[in-house]
Image (cartoon, rainbow, N blue to C red):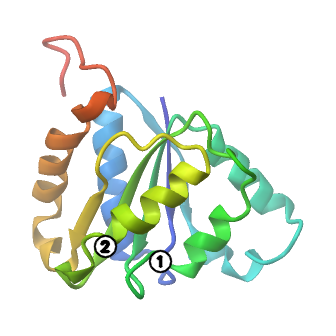
Amino acid sequence: MKVAVVVGNPKPESRTLMVARAVAQRVCARFHGVISVELDLVKFAPKMFSWPDEELAGLNAAVAESDVLVVASPTYKATYTGLLKAFLDRYPNNGLAGVTAIPVMTAGSPLHGMSIEQGLRPLLVELGASVPTRGLFFLMSQMDSLEDVVDAWADDHLRAGGFFAPMPPGTES
């Protein structure tokens, strides 16, 4: 299983990237996957509005070829960042068909808790991705408990709603 990570935080090596990696690692551990591509989009920001761009086209293709996509953004103005939107806008209609997506949003306040379900999930569905479970809304105040929070989310959601078939008994990691 190929797992892609795409992070739209305008700060390189952000805490949002740390959360997205933790989610991707849980997916890989439970379903014998490997992180096949990790995009910290800020590294590509100067090219984001260059059309066409071979490097970005290749990155879009690599993400679309993944089985699972962990897509993460900090919450800006009650939704995802423009950086993430600009990358996802490069996909055609149904450009993520066949990909199972896990939306992840980080925030400083619980006031924006619905942004993941009202903003990021519909965007991923519009692009053809399957989003079979709730995303992870992660408060920055939880950083000291990152592993525990992501483990609890994974236990509650990676098997919920038919995300993936359960692993045979005795094979769980």
Query: Of callouts 1 and 2, which one flags the residue occurring earlier in the amino acid sequence?
Result: 1
Q: Residue at x 50, y 79 (%)?
A: 81
- Going by the numbered disc 1, the residue's amino acid type is Asn
For numbered disc 1, what is the local secondary structure?
A: loop
Q: Are marks 1 and 2 in contact (CB under 8 Å)?
A: yes
> Position of 11 compared to 88: left or right?
left
Looking at the image, residue 136 lies above or below residue 93: below
> Position of 134 compared to 97: left or right?
left
Looking at the image, residue 159 lies above or below residue 56: above
Q: Residue at x 77, y 76 (%)?
A: 47
Could you tell me which quadrant the C terminus lies in?
A: top left
Q: Residue at x 20, y 84 (%)?
A: 109
Q: Residue at x 51, y 72 (%)?
A: 8
> Position of 57 compared to 108: left or right?
right
Q: In the image shown, does 145 or 84 lie closer to the viewer?
A: 84
Looking at the image, residue 161 lies above or below residue 63: above
Place of residue 23 in the rendered image (x, y in percent of width and height, measured from the top left): 31, 51
The label shown at residue 9 is 1
The label shown at residue 106 is 2
